Image: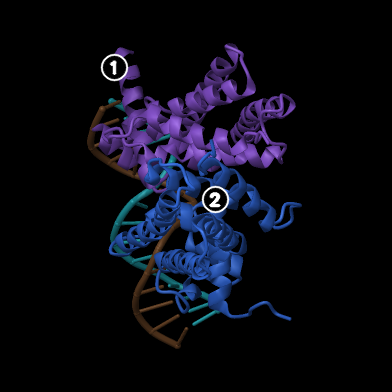
Chain colours: A blue, B purple, C cyan, D brown
Amino acid sequence: MEITSDRKTQIRMAAQNMFRSKGYSATSVRDLAKEVGIEAASLYNHISSKEDILREICFHIADAFFQAIEKSEAEGGSATKRMERAIENHIEVIVSHIDASSVFFHEWKHLSEPQLSEFKQLRRKYESRFIQILEDGVHEGRFRDMDLRMTSFTIFSAMNATYDLYKPSGKIGPKAISKHIADIIIQGIHQHKS
Amino acid sequence: MEITSDRKTQIRMAAQNMFRSKGYSATSVRDLAKEVGIEAASLYNHISSKEDILREICFHIADAFFQAIEKSEAEGGSATKRMERAIENHIEVIVSHIDASSVFFHEWKHLSEPQLSEFKQLRRKYESRFIQILEDGVHEGRFRDMDLRMTSFTIFSAMNATYDLYKPSGKIGPKAISKHIADIIIQGIHQHKS
DNA sequence: CCTACCGATCGGTAGG
DNA sequence: CCTACCGATCGGTAGG
């Protein structure tokens, strides 16, 4: 019945939670060790450095986002349909890794090179997938012809705040959140029939 | 005292910039002093603590947001018109205090009590002003009848990412940003004529 | 996984 | 605004 007694996993879970609530810099390895129930020095049998944990968290979530967009596009369909799925799957990733995604969004800047550049590059690549769908939508005459970089930015902003809106114990489920946000965004970017 | 208040401003500007780029916890008072060009101990002739600076930054921006919403509502008009102005003025605050507003959004959690609670309360009050406009819009039959807390959340998310999109040296001006975001949001929440 | 410990740095104070 | 300095804590290592 143990969710996981694997120490490494346990450390990562604690780190995700503390990095989110206190921030990476304000979380000491001693805080972390205490939460796990061992001495600080013992952490180093499982990790090589504090930043190592941050790196794992950030790149693991990056992976999940890429899998999500692959899945969104795999089924094909109109740009509208693909954008709806992209939003839904993106939010699904956030909701199912609620602490880790918050760390992904706010603590990545504490990565050092070369991981920092690699991280930024992955993010740009991911954003370009959304911009591509927007372009398709404009060409199909479904979406308004706007500054697509700004539009994708607006979409990401709305989606990424989910980690702040969703409470695992709350009444609002992940599907309700993604549907609500997708609703506003899709209607917001759609071409009017006139 | 001229020198003192000059220095104080200089310290605050440096703090806004460094708290934004490195985060509050990762910025030491020695980093700050170096940037200002004095010794760390000398900072304490102008500030009473590191957190003191953070407190000033956060509450100063809170003030600016309240002035913005007052101004938005003062002219009256339809809910649509007032929401457009609220979005525009909110983004205007972010753009004209670009570093400080980023600190406001991400570093407030390092405030200690009772300032922490006071800060959260101010934020809730500010959000309720937006929700009120949304309610008016629904009653006027202009806005769709949705979960307004979630809708206001989506609006804030889209607006607050401006600090990441706007570069003082870039080609995109503040007006272009606020117009773009307001555009998508207003169309996104509007009631369809059917 | 522990005890014992490292040098570096932290926010801040005393006294001039 | 400085020099000199405080105790506390930092990330991490040695050795068992």
The kind of secondary structure element at disc 2 is helix
* Residue farthest right in this picture: A171
- Amino acid type of the residue that numbered disc 2 sits on in the rendered structure: Met
Q: Residue A147: x, y in percent?
A: 38, 41
Q: Is residue B107 visible?
A: no
- The quarter holding residue A6 reads bottom right
Q: Residue at x 45, y 42 (%)?
A: A144
Q: Is residue A193 above or below residue A65?
A: above
Q: Residue B160: x, y in percent?
A: 49, 37
Q: Is residue B24 left or right of residue A89?
A: left
Q: CA distance from mark 1 to mark 2?
A: 46 Å
Q: Is residue B87 above or below residue A114?
A: above
Check disc 1: other Cα within 10 Å, few if <14, some if 14-19, many if 20+.
Answer: few
The kind of secondary structure element at disc 1 is helix
Q: Residue at x 23, y 33 (%)?
A: B37
Number of labels in the image equals: 2
Please give the label number shown on residue B3: 1
- Amino acid type of the residue that numbered disc 1 sits on in the rendered structure: Ile
- The quarter holding residue B169 reads top left
* Frontmost residue, C8 versus B72: B72
Please give the label number shown on residue B194: none
Q: Is residue A14 left or right of residue B135?
A: left
- Name the residue beneath numbered marker 2: A159
Q: Is residue B111 above or below residue A128?
A: above
Chain ID, mark 1: B
Q: Residue B127: x, y in percent?
A: 63, 31
